Image (spheres, rainbow, N blue to C red):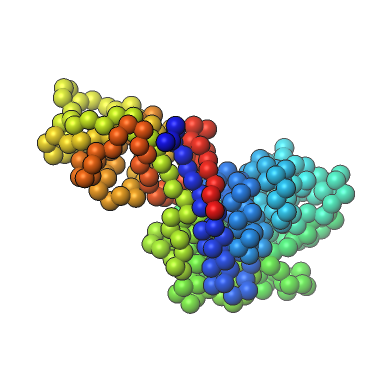
Amino acid sequence: MLAKATVTVDLAKVTGNTHRVVEALGGRGVYGVTKVTCGSPEVARAMLAGGAAGIADSRLENVECMREAGVDAEFWSLRAPALARAEEAVRLLDVSLESEIETVRALDVAARALGKRHRIVAMVDLGDLREGMLPADLPAFLDAAEGLPNIEVFGIGTSLTCYGAIVPDADNLGELVALTRSAEARLGRRLHVSGGMSSSLDALVDGILPERIDSLRIGESILLGVSTVTRDPILGLHTDAITVCAPVIECLVKPSMPRGTSAQDAFGQRPVFLDSGERRRAILAMGRQDVVPEGLVPVDPRVQVLGASSDHLVLDVHDLPEPPRLGDSIAFIPNYAATLAAFTSPYVEKRFVG
């Protein structure tokens, strides 16, 4: 019997999904992205067991947690560090993704103080409008970074789909390869091509992922088993490696329409209700402070998520053959947003099996 909301990770399925992605990419590197799990050492180890070449995360706190837990891996940072954290970044990271030369200069100073040489991937914005310099600014960036004695320009990369929802295609991935070849000619050596994240797996499936791309940064597709372009299953991956459960704290038959004058709910919204007569409703000990209710798919399709306040999740369970009892748990498959919330909430217990 569950005492509280719980997010559970099947580590064997995470390892299996990682192995399948590595296999599908045919020799290209896979950097397992752990940020949605808040840098879980258990998840990082499962990805590495599946053949990931290293681990990537956005937060230095997460990388430090994994290193302190004994995770032995090459660590990439997906987000450029704040200037005030340059020393911490050089100490914790093997590679960071960079687009501002001022930040790279700060990393150079920190690397000199620590007696290290720090590797960077120069990030180029190819239309998604998140991080990355414009292509025209890449040559000047490379010239400046190449002149820093404690910095190694390791590669060229891009991010697609996460912010602007731009799909990796033959045009933008081809531009990435062309920019890399131009950079290689400029610097006189081969560079690593970091060809995006989970959304680039769709380009692989469609047969348009350029051979020149050396690695991808994969999180959501490994953990949730879906394409981040369509949210459909991809590559035959497990789609149930992560589940969210919570205990029933009330289960009563009630009208489906509220009674009284309607205004705004706790989040400033005006809810709309459908009159379905009297229905059995269950309340779970979980709410918007723990998950994104719209991102929960009940494992039993006869259960319907009606909505939530900050701490109560309301379900229609009328179509179940037997009503849930108090203390019973109801399980869901979460999408990315719901997974992120569940791992971030201190009120949700984290469990690892397999």
Q: Identify the image quadrant of residue 29.
A: bottom right
Figure check: 348 above or below 63? above
Q: Nearer the viewer, residue 234 or 126?
A: 234
Q: Which image quarter holds the N terminus? A: top left
Q: Position of residue 207 (x, y in %)?
A: 48, 77
Q: Residue at x 49, y 46 (%)?
A: 8
Q: Is residue 113 visible?
A: yes
Figure check: 331 above or below 11? above
Q: Residue at x 69, y 53 (%)?
A: 75
Q: Position of residue 272 (x, y in %)?
A: 21, 36
Q: Position of residue 203 (x, y in %)?
A: 48, 70
Q: Nearer the viewer, residue 158 or 43?
A: 43
Q: Nearer the viewer, residue 140 or 327?
A: 327
Q: Identify the image quadrant of residue 53.
A: bottom right
Q: Residue at x 84, y 51 (%)?
A: 116
Q: How many marks?
A: 0
